[in-house]
Amino acid sequence: MAGYFKVLSIDGGGIRGLIPALVLAKLEALVGPLHKQFDLIAGTSTGGIIAVGLTAPAPGGGGAAFSAGDLVDLYMNDGGAIFYSPVYKRLSHLDDLVERKYDHKPLQKILKKKLSEARLKDALTELLVTSYDLHAGKPYFFKRSKAKADAPRRDHPLWEVARATSAAPTYFEPHQMQGPPSAPAKSLVDGGVFANNPAMCAYAEAMKLKKPLQDILIVSLGTGDEDMGKPASWQKYKHTKAKGWGVIGWARPAINIMMDGVADTVDHQLQQILVDSAHAKPARPQTYFRFQSPLTDETKDMDDADEKSLAALKKLGVSLARKEKAQLEKLASILGA
């Protein structure tokens, strides 16, 4: 068991990051600080914020800046400030169609305050966070390994890593990142546009390090699935409505469809690689854990951070941890072996 290359991966999903944060808090209570338990922690968007928080060094040393429990508090206490929209914007649907929905400054201020001067190269374990560079027209991966090997060109303040990965199109403006003269400026948006579930990116990173398939352990956490548990007749977007959508009508549904579809696809791929192959003879131990919860009408929105929605999200996270108690204990036994 001790020979596993252990990967933790957290999906994107806005305020719904509270769900995986609560599950991780339960796991943390069983095994201790998570940066000591995993060889690589990966995240996208809100999952990227969690990944950064779990690996950022505390000022003055002495461990991580945040526990999973601290990140639960971040969602509960600061979510409303991050997803705050003035009354005049809430009353004007036109503003919502022609400009980003939220001001990025509260999010940026919170990230700067919480992460201080910590840098990517100083992360406490290997870190992989996704983003997309609009200038270059391709994905940009924040990696601790790259930051160490190619500083200052690939090293960045961790608050900027968290800001860039969570710059969801239509919700926040892109993050402009200025590098040294040898590196062009970047305009970065949410990695969820191509890897809302970053577990496959993390798996590829483990393979790049020449880790054998049977020695890779993947722990993947979702931020809720609106389709999960629904009857086959249920329709998320009705054809009668969608057939009339133009560019504006498709804008936000397209983002949601793209992010949800990518997350489900990656789970399917890893099921095929790591679970179905376990049925081979001789049977192998379980090396893929996926923790996901169905969503309710109160919890489906990525940006609804009022008290009622936060309470409902917390209930889902607590319920998921309780439901998956046996899996969490099994995982803890593997991590502690």
Image (cartoon, helix red, strand yellow):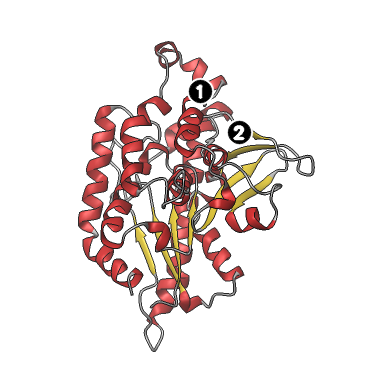
Q: Which amino acid type is shown beneath numbered disc 2?
A: His
> Which mark identifies residue 103?
1
Q: Exactly how many numbered labels are in the figure?
A: 2
Q: Please state the horizontal and vertical placement of residue 87, each as a whole percent of the image.
A: 39, 12
Residue holding disc 2: 175
Cα distance between the residues tagged 2 and 1: 12 Å
Asked if one can make out residue 291 in the rendered structure from this viewpoint, the answer is yes
Q: Position of residue 135 (x, y in %)?
A: 72, 38
For the residue carrying disc 1, how many other residues have a C-alpha within 10 Å: few (<14), some (14-19), or many (20+)?
some
In the foreground, 114 or 46: 114
Q: Residue at x 36, y 60 (%)?
A: 290
Of the 4 image quadrants, the one containing the N terminus is bottom left
Q: Is residue 165 left or right of residue 229?
A: right
What residue is shown at x 26% (from left), y 28% (from top)?
307
- Percent from the top left, x then y, of residue 105? 51, 24
Q: Earlier in the sequence, mark 2 or mark 1?
A: 1
Image point (36%, 30%), residue name: 78
- The numbered dot on residue 222 is none
User: Residue 261: image x %, image y %?
Assistant: 47, 50
Could one spot residue 235 in this view of the protein?
A: no
Residue drawn 46% across the image and 66% down it: 270
